[in-house]
Image (cartoon, rainbow, N blue to C red):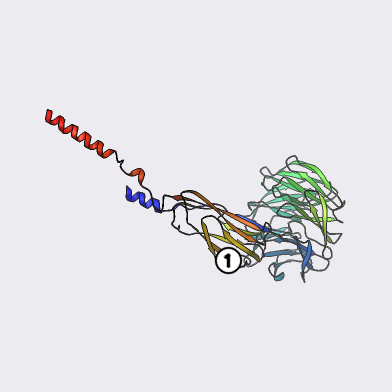
Amino acid sequence: MFKNLLIFCVSFTFILTGIKQIYAEPFVYISNLGDDSVSVVDTATNTVVDTINSVMTPGDIAVTPNGRFVYVSVSAGGNKFTVIDALTNTVIDTVTIGLNPYPVVAHPDGTKVYIGNTFDDTVSVIETTNHQVVDTITGVGGDPSSMTISIDGSRLYTADFSGNSVTVINTVTNMVIGTINLTDQPFGIGVHPNGTRLYVSDTNNNSLWVIDTNSNSVIDTVTVGNNPEAIIFQPDGSLLYVANEMDDSISVVDTATNQSIATINNVGTGPFGLSIHPNGKFLYTNNMSGQGVSVIDTETMSKVDGVTVGVSPNTFQNFIGPDFLAEANPNNLNFGDQNVGTASGTMTLSLSFTGLGPLSLTAIDSSGEFSQTDNCGNSLSFAEICTITITFTPTAAGARTGTLTITSNANNQTLTVPLNGNGVGNGGCSLNKFQPRTNIIPLFFLLFTIGVLGFRIL
């Protein structure tokens, strides 16, 4: 029993949980139909930091979830899409697809991109590893003008402008599994983050259809502004924003009640496209008539900035890249029991940066009775991973705590990882509770003596 106990005392328990993230600013990508270019806008400064030229008649845009690639449909009667490497802002591929492609959406897992072909009523499925067409979905309603995909990636929805319908597609089989008939021409479409409802803009009647995704039926309508186009949600799904092209406004809809609760006026001339910062604090409108991007503060519900881009901006929905994320994985280290005055075995966590970067590291420090070493250097580039190694050496018994602090140029500047352990004994494993009590020995002799005497008397 004591041997087994000794093995238990010198072993340690490691508890790993979760991923903690830090943030930096993403980019907005605007296709400019009038001058065959794509403008790259830094949302930290709201300025154009690059212009990608020779993108012929660019249409809608989708950015892969890791921010690496930007897919641009070639509209205005074309039959191609263009791939931009976001690390270098250069065109790296152009691929032939269906006729007059426009809407583009990326699968949440980043493996595929879907492009709607408005003249032949199909959807091209693009594999993002080599940017090639791997399937073509037929049976889509007439003129798929916009698309959206569920958060879990299982369902793709197309708003079919001339078909007066919404098409439901299973993304595993790439098959049409349903058609939702509407009473007029739909244009913009968005699926609520919880996946239970679709919102579809009815440009002719200045309203939205609300569709139950379980029954694929219209359950409500919402009155909005004049000629509603693009639709976008707050990340938590509490609010919905609609770009109203003909009255230069954005309608704000409470998704719990399906009521329009506010109108943001004077957002720019002809707001057509709409996207939202991943943190939900700012909206970006693509003003097709005004040749610019407006920045809207979602708290004050007012325009706070404007950015001049190219001629006839043509991007529709979700044209912003993802958050630039640095991740500490795991986000909590627990060393369990460790003998006082002795060093534990090492535990490691990985620090990675999935934005375009680079992530500049100012310091990596540990506190308390925890020490660290790392191979991170001064910066991390796109998709680079470094390792931080932690050791626990308790100086006293009981619960011991510390913190790993990573300081960088990310948005919140400081990432902290809690460190925990438990000091045991006084430099060794105590077995006191298993040792015989000293008063047991004299008691034994007393009982023995009484027993012997009793035997002799008998």
- Is disc 1 surrounded by few (<14), some (14 to 19) or many (20+) residues within 10 Å? some
Q: Quadrant of residue 354?
A: bottom right
Q: Quadrant of residue 50?
A: bottom right
Q: Is residue 101 visible?
A: no
Front-most of 200 and 424? 424
- Residue at point 25%, 36% (across, down): 443
Residue 276 placement (x, y as % from top left): 74, 54
Front-most of 152 and 180? 152
Residue 200 placement (x, y as % from top left): 76, 48
Does residue 334 appear left or right of residue 319 in this picture?
left
Q: Is residue 176 above or below residue 311?
A: above
Q: Type of residue at label 1?
A: Cys
- Residue at point 85%, 62% (across, down): 291
Q: Quadrant of the C terminus?
A: top left
Residue 277 placement (x, y as % from top left): 73, 55
Q: Secondary structure at mark 1?
A: loop
Q: Is residue 34 above or below residue 197?
A: below
Front-most of 53 and 116? 53
- Residue at point 82%, 68% (across, down): 35
Does residue 362 appear left or right of residue 390 in this picture?
right
Total marks shown come to 1
Does residue 344 appear left or right of residue 173 in this picture?
left
Residue 366 placement (x, y as % from top left): 56, 58
* Residue at the farthest top position: 458
Q: Which residue is mark 1?
A: 376
Q: Is residue 58 visible?
A: yes
Front-most of 305 and 265? 305
